[in-house]
Every structure is written in C-alpha cells, then in structure tokens.
Amino acid sequence: MSNDRSPDDTAQEASTQKLVEHTLRDERLLLASVLQNLPLGVGIYDSDGSLIHSNQSLRDYARLDRLPSRQPTETRRWRGYDKDGRLIGPSDYPGARALRGERVMPGIDFLYEGSDEQERWMRVSAVPFRREGPKVYEAIVVVQDINDLKRAREQIEAAAASYASESRFLEATLSSNPGLCVRV
C-alpha cells in the first residue's frame, strides 16, 4: 500500500493551505484594525502582570507596562471604588482579579492621576484568558475614559440637590405665612 498522492491531490492541498493562510492573515489584520480603532484602551497582560499587547488608546490613557496592582508605585495613581463608593485595594483591581480567574464586568470606576497630575475618571474591566497548554491566566483589560460622563453626572446631582434645597426653603416660607395667598 502506497501513500503516494497524485499531483492533482498535492496541488489541491497546497491551494487549500494557501487559502487558509490568506484567510488567517486577513482575520488578523481585521482584528488588529478593530482593536486599534476602538474608543477604548485594550491590553493583554501575562500572568506576572506585564503588558503583552495593547492598542494605542491604552497607551494614550495610561502608559501601563504592568498592571497597577503589580506596581506599588502606580497604585497611588489609581483609586478604585466599589459600588458603595468605598476605596478598594490593589488585590481587588480588575486586572489582579482576572489573573485569579474572575470576570470584572461592567467594571470598576477609578480616579486616575495622569503624568500631568490631572485626575480623570476611568472605568476598568477585565476578563481572564487562558491559552492552550499553560494552566495560568492572562488578563484582557479594557479601560474606558468616563471622565466627561462622571463630571456631568456630578454637576446634575449638585444642581438637583440645590434645586431641592431651594424648593424646601420656598415651601417652608410659604407655609409659615398662612395669610399669603397666591392667585393665578
């Protein structure tokens, strides 16, 4: 019994392999283009918390070669808050949790102090990722600049509190003057 293939079979296999390689190249280019053009920072960190890949937005936002939870000098620049507004520790940062196998979605809001010493609100999400073979997690981290949304919300809440206070004052003033009659 011979394993010889006909020239037509060999040519067909070579053509199929070229098509598969071309398709994979196109898919990689598409994925790279999507990641580069997202209005989000996206980074992949290895099990030690070192950056493996990132898009330009992540580099623009934070310039993090390592997860802040793995760099004590960086943790002071990232102040994260839980859903009740309490400060969280570095071991509870999304990247650190993803490296332990946890999903942190929709994310945690951080007040980040940039190199210009200006503070900006960032929402950080992370999910674990495990490649074939190794039994260790890597982390896919997504950073979204939510500063404008957060500041607008703070202004709306402050205006609502002021309005409520003025409304209570007006009601108290009117109710303390029973003879005051307003005609419409």
Image (cartoon, grey):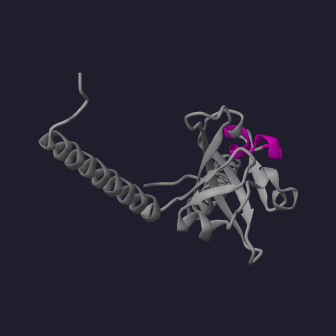
**Residues shaded magenta:** 86-98
Q: Which of the 4 image quarters holds residue 79?
A: bottom right
Q: Nearer the viewer, residue 144 or 130?
A: 130
Viewer-proximal residue, 176 or 56? 56
Residue 33 x/y as whole percent: 39, 62
Residue 82 lies in quadrant: top right
Does residue 161 lie above or below 12 as drawn?
below
Query: Which residue appears at 73% of the width and 73% of the height?
Result: 118
Q: Position of residue 20 (x, y in %)?
A: 28, 47
Question: Is 92 included in the stretch rendered in magenta?
Answer: yes
Q: Is residue 37 above or below residue 133?
A: below
Q: How many marks?
A: 0
Q: Quick check: can you spot residue 152? A: yes
**Residue located farthest toward the front when viewing the structure as drawn:** 1
Between 49 and 121, which is closer to the camera in this rendering?
A: 49
Residue at 24% of width from left, 50% of height from top? 19
Residue drawn at x 77%, y 55% is 68
